[in-house]
Amino acid sequence: MDSFAVQIRDAIRRNETVVIGCECEVEYSGRAEAFLPMGERLIIIKSDNTLLVHQPEGNAPINYMKPDAKHSVAVEDGRLYIRSQNLALKEYLDINMRKVHFVNSHALKDGQKIQIIGTEKDMSEMIYNNPSLISPDFRPLSMEEHTKYGFIDVFGYDKDNNLVIVECKRYNADLSAVTQLRRYVEKMKKLKGTANIKGMIAAPKITSNAEQMAKDWGFSFVAVEPPKYKERYKKDQKTLTHF
Amino acid sequence: MDSFAVQIRDAIRRNETVVIGCECEVEYSGRAEAFLPMGERLIIIKSDNTLLVHQPEGNAPINYMKPDAKHSVAVEDGRLYIRSQNLALKEYLDINMRKVHFVNSHALKDGQKIQIIGTEKDMSEMIYNNPSLISPDFRPLSMEEHTKYGFIDVFGYDKDNNLVIVECKRYNADLSAVTQLRRYVEKMKKLKGTANIKGMIAAPKITSNAEQMAKDWGFSFVAVEPPKYKERYKKDQKTLTHF
DNA sequence: GGGGAGAGATGCCGC
DNA sequence: GCGGCATTTCTCCCC
């Protein structure tokens, strides 16, 4: 345990990214209170002093500390302790390790940003540039507009010169998508002093309740898929040798 | 590279949790398309075949595959490749490693669930059991009610026997919290055929715009903190020796 | 830093 | 499976 403690302490001091495989229990106190009983997990301490506790299953960390935490390492009665504190956020996390399977660390550097295609913004741009996707007569005015009354995805006119507010969703549109649109339409009606403002949901799908609510409010729904420029991995493409 | 490949393949086959420190680039195709240029990262493969790519900073994985993906490992021209597929979800992820800093793996077992205090549900229960927290005359009827017209946190009567719907938020209540409450109140008015239904937001704080919207709709706001039963780490408590 | 809204959201529960 | 909704949401962008 002592040599692990030294190793972890040194790695943190050198701003390395540390990985620990261990059996531990975890207590968290901050925005909420949490206790995780003894079990085998992965602990990760990043170079920005983020701390993550990962169980051997699932996507999300089960416990964590945000960047800029301060970590203390100690050994007591054959157990390895990591106490992590973020005084500014009043968050505290304690890890009590009964067994350490492995410790590894390395100075990792990575300034790269991810490039994503197929976001809601990409959908807005696609509709703005191809208005016929939602209606043969739609004439777009603006997109991704940050206004005081809300963030409007696409804005334009229909064939009768009514203003149309389009709310895009890259996934199944739900009730909150409709209430969001409703909020924009109401604000805009008030602002323009006109009742002739239309609302439209553009999404691949819509839940039945959301569809009903949209109908009740006179909003229309158009099925639109988010754009994907690169259609790779065709069915017949050969894959790398598996094992 | 070859020995790393063998090590990773064997670990995956044995359902171990694998950690790789490496320099890599990542491509993802599925719900969206994503590309992450070459940089130094941590790759984690869990026993349920979740795959995570973590940059050395930040909380969330930059790339990932959900559980039940199938991973292939290969070496070509001195590079280590991991190709991960989830055919059911039509998701694909490719990792191209230029350099491997370390590989570690271990069979981790953990069936434990986390216990959390201070959730929105805890807030609902607290208000239900201590109605004077929101008003001296509030009489609670039910809590956490899954109804057809919505999921109502706390439901009760005020001193004038008006029905009151309380929406709890454990954080700063925002516009969507108000629209959510508005939806419940409207549905309930329709259902009961009465206009005397009150709406109330119970949260530690409320944003200025949300407060205005609540006022416009005749909803009240009450400042309530989420419960925290264990107040540990008092200011003067001694901490473990730091370094 | 607050406010607003998206996310390849994730995860939980109920039907 | 879908639907509704919270999350120690996280993250980004704008004011």
Image (cartoon, coloured by chain):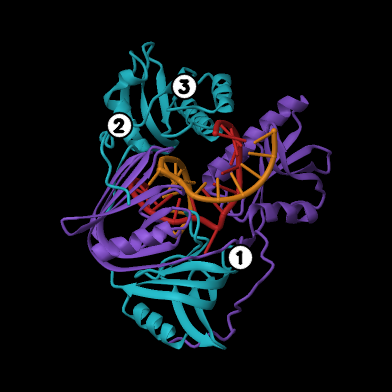
Chain colours: A purple, B cyan, C red, D orange
Q: Tell which subunit mark 2 falls on.
A: B
Q: Nearer the viewer, residue A219 or B132?
A: B132
For the point 54% across and 86% down, the residue is: B78
Residue B109 in view: no
Q: Is residue B234 left or right of residue A187?
A: left
Query: To which residue does mark 2 refer?
Result: B125
Q: Are the numbered discs 3 and 2 placed on the same chain, yes or no?
A: yes
For the point 43% across and 28% down, the residue is: B204
Q: Are the numbered discs 1 and 2 placed on the same chain, yes or no?
A: yes
Query: In the current view of this chain or complex, which residue is farthest to the top?
Result: B160
Residue B101 in view: yes
Q: Nearer the viewer, residue B197 or B65?
A: B65
Decide: is A171 above or below B177. below
Tell me the amino acid under the disc marked 1. Ala
Tell me the amino acid under the disc marked 3. Phe
Decide: is B81 above or below B40. below
- Indicate the secondary structure of the residue bearing disc 3: strand
Query: To which residue does mark 3 refer?
Result: B221
Decide: is D15 above or below A134. above
Q: Where does the image place residue A46, in percent across and percent down from the top left?
A: 44, 58
- Looking at the rendering, which quadrant does residue B19 occupy? bottom left
